[in-house]
Image (tube, rainbow, N blue to C red):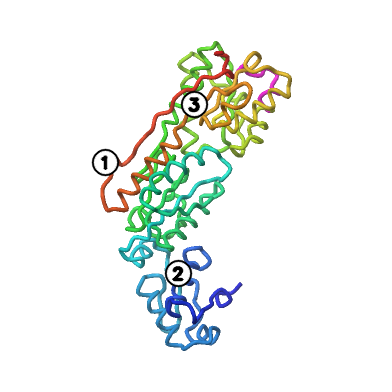
Amino acid sequence: MTILELLNVYPRQDASLVQQIKQQITWLVASGQLRAGDPLPSVRQLASHLGINVNTVRSAYQKLEAEGLVETRQGRGTQVLPFDLSRFAQAQGVLRSHTIGVIIPSWSQPFYHAFLQGVEEVAEKDKTLLFICNSHDDPGNAWRDFARLSAKGVDGILVASHDITQSQPAGGKALESQRGTPYVTVDWPGCTGYSVQLDLESAGYQATHHLVTHGHQRIGLITFAVDIENITPVNSGYQRALREAGLTPDPDVIARVPSFSPTAGAEGAHRILSLEKPPTAIFAISDTLALGALQVIKEAGLRIPGDIALVGIDDIPAASLVEPRLTTVSAPSYQLGLEAMKMLRLLIEGKKPPHRQITLPTSLVIRKSCGCW
């Protein structure tokens, strides 16, 4: 589809024709449909396509140029400039929109359901509307959503399980140096800027240490396939608990899976159970993975915890509903959303939060699947 085919004007709308053109081109830039160096149609070409006066198009281009989104040069026409999010913030002015953007990596993960409830509690008190975006675990999508939300003039953005500074396209101005839309990063250790984190290393340690105290010396691990910032600490906690017990981590009992779904958990459990010498316990780094593993263990005719113990992380509602009930490490996702939204609210108000980073503790929840009952 050409740029001309993407642009339309509606004379009966309240917004002026100039404003309509400017808003549509701004959105095309924010959504990545127009990139740095791309040419805009000539003033005459666009005016003819839209059936409006050339001066109207010229005025829209001038406003875009004044906001630093495009540049017009004699003989070269009008081209899109490198993306700068701070330009959007300047263009929106100082009026509050009473809207907040929230970027999460997946709709399907129950962990984020509770997180969003915490965000909503604070937002509702301020009568703030939430725009929720699903990045599908793709950093590129997370950046696209961040840019779109900024272009729409939200007051602030929460970014869960992504480091937005590492997601932006190469060649642009570093996000840390821009005075753009306020944002808070959630559940991503090591990020710059304001953030709210979970003590993930402790979560991995607690789960594994608990299994070690039950006498298990061969403990399987179902973990994510990629060592990313909010996975590595969990794996490190697992390894620390083994080393403290004088046990050497065995790579053969570690199953790396492509997602956090129960299907992926089942895949990991199949791999571990098919070993010549399978472990006597399995630690899965999320409850959804553990639930998939639980099903496979049962289908193999094994008893939990009699033949193999099982522990997860998150303490999602389903963890206490399955049989046997799942021992897990509680990650306070609701509190995570609450604290992140409180921090963002201060930034929106132009205030400095008392802490640049908040780390919330995790705690072991003992149920039947580990063998305690």
The 10 Å Cα crowd at callout 1, few under 14, some 14 to 19, many 20 or more, is few
Q: Is residue 168 above or below residue 298?
A: below
Q: Quadrant of the C terminus?
A: top right
Q: Is residue 308 above or below residue 234?
A: above
Pick whichever, 215 or 171, lies toward us: 215
Q: Which mark is residue 354?
A: 1
| x then y, percent, for residue 209 | 48, 18
| x then y, percent, for residue 361 | 39, 29
Q: Tell me how far mark 3 sits from mark 1, CA to CA.
A: 28 Å
Amino acid at the residue labelled 3:
Val
Question: What span is colored magenta in the figure?
Answer: 271-281
Q: Tell me how far mark 2 sits from mark 1, CA to CA.
A: 35 Å
According to the picture, the residue beneath numbered tag 3 turns out to be 329
Give the residue at x 53% y 50%.
Answer: 135
Amino acid at the residue labelled 1:
Pro
Pick whichever, 303 or 68, lies toward us: 303
The image quadrant that residue 287 belongs to is top right
Q: Tell me how far mark 2 sits from mark 3, CA to CA.
A: 45 Å
Q: Quadrant of the N terminus?
A: bottom right
According to the picture, the residue beneath numbered tag 2 turns out to be 26
| x then y, percent, for residue 369 | 59, 19
The 10 Å Cα crowd at callout 2, few under 14, some 14 to 19, many 20 or more, is some
Left/right placement of residue 224 relative to residue 122 reads right
Give the residue at x 56% y 48%.
Answer: 136
